[in-house]
Image (cartoon, helix red, strand yellow):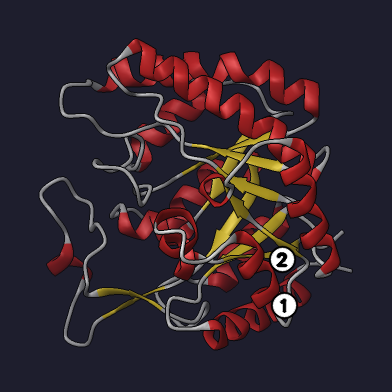
């Protein structure tokens, strides 16, 4: 089975989840013309977690011709406050149930490590995150939901970047959680670039554990080099000189990425994170991904 493609409205994240000038229902209607199989959701999109409200969201997604394969959550499992970590666990558990409600068994619910708090050392952070994920895994198993640990940069509503942003920390954390049926990697090649790492090198390390993927692309502003953007910790961050654009026309080598995934018989979802310059670019990105899937994966 070939990977299927979903769309995520990164361009409208603030409007839907922050200022509330758009609703998730507005986005679903806007997405109708897009050539996608599913719509990825974000936990901040929902104004209620009551069953009646979630039923309305699910019905709107279905009526627009889509599935809901992935739910993007941002648990802060590195918070030095034990009560805050407990609340993060409770929120992730609730989101696993929402993922099942909207996507059924086999849907992916994202997990993150948490923020890179200045006073939280690497060893302690990895221990906390592993403990938190182990506590939510039984709920994932119960509902048949797969947890996807993303190599992330920074949730838009966080103060600090991702604790496990750098590849070496991400891989150490991944190794600390041996579960493979209901836990794996949500791979994002653009986030590897932002981390100052090689997206292909990361993928080669984690390809056998990838359960979902975000597909976007980054462009360097004219006259800029990656080395010029590199910060003291080796990351690039969200520099204004590192820009979003049409997937397949930027820094990521998608032929190589899809070749590696196909070599590991990847059959999960690929979610397009795009539209920062309008839905027309998102449509172009989706068309590119359709061509790449057809090229690298047998029907």
Mark 2 and mark 1 in contact? Answer it, CB < 8 Å.
yes
Q: Would you say 120 lies left or right of 194 here?
A: left
User: Tag 2's secondary structure?
Assistant: strand
Quarter location, residue 38: bottom right
Q: Quadrant of the C terminus?
A: bottom right
x and y percent of residue 119 in the render? 16, 22
Residue 275 placement, left or right of 93: left
- The answer, for residue 266, to whether it is visible in the render is no
**Residue pointed to by mark 2:** 5
Tally of numbered discs: 2
User: Of 90 and 259, which appears nearest the observer?
Assistant: 90
Asked which quadrant contains residue 106, the reply is: top right
Q: Residue at x 33, y 53 (%)?
A: 197
Q: Which one is earlier in the sequence, the residue at label 2 or at label 1?
A: 2
| Residue ID for mark 1 | 290
- Residue 129 placement: quadrant: top left
Q: Position of residue 167 (x, y in %)?
A: 37, 42
């Amino acid at each position: 089975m070939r990977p299927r493609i979903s769309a995520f409205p990164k361009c409208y994240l603030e409007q839907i989840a922050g200022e509330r000038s758009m609703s998730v229902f507005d986005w679903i209607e806007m997405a109708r013309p897009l050539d996608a199989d599913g719509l990825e959701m974000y936990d901040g999109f929902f104004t209620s977690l009551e069953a009646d409200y979630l039923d309305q969201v699910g019905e709107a997604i279905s009526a627009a011709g889509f599935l809901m394969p992935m739910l993007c959550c941002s648990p802060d499992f590195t918070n030095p406050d034990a009560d805050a970590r407990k609340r993060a666990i409770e929120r992730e558990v609730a989101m696993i149930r929402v993922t099942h409600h909207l996507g059924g068994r086999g849907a992916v619910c994202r997990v993150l490590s948490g923020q890179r708090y200045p006073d939280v050392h690497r060893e302690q952070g990895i221990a906390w995150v592993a403990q938190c994920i182990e506590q939510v895994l039984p709920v994932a198993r119960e509902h048949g939901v797969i947890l996807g640990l993303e190599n992330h940069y920074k949730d838009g509503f966080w103060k600090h970047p991702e604790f496990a942003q750098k590849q070496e920390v991400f891989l150490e954390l991944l190794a600390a959680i041996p579960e493979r049926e209901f836990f794996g990697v949500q791979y994002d090649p653009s986030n590897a670039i932002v981390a100052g790492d090689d997206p292909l090198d990361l993928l080669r390390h984690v390809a056998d554990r990838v359960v979902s993927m975000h597909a976007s692309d980054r462009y360097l502003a004219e006259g800029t080099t990656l080395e010029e953007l590199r910060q003291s910790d080796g990351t690039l961050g969200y520099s204004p000189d590192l820009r979003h654009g049409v997937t397949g026309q930027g820094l990521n080598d998608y032929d190589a990425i899809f070749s590696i995934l196909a070599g590991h018989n990847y059959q999960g979802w690929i979610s397009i994170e795009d539209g920062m310059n309008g839905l027309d670019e998102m449509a172009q990105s989706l068309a590119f991904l359709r061509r790449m899937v057809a090229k690298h994966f047998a029907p």
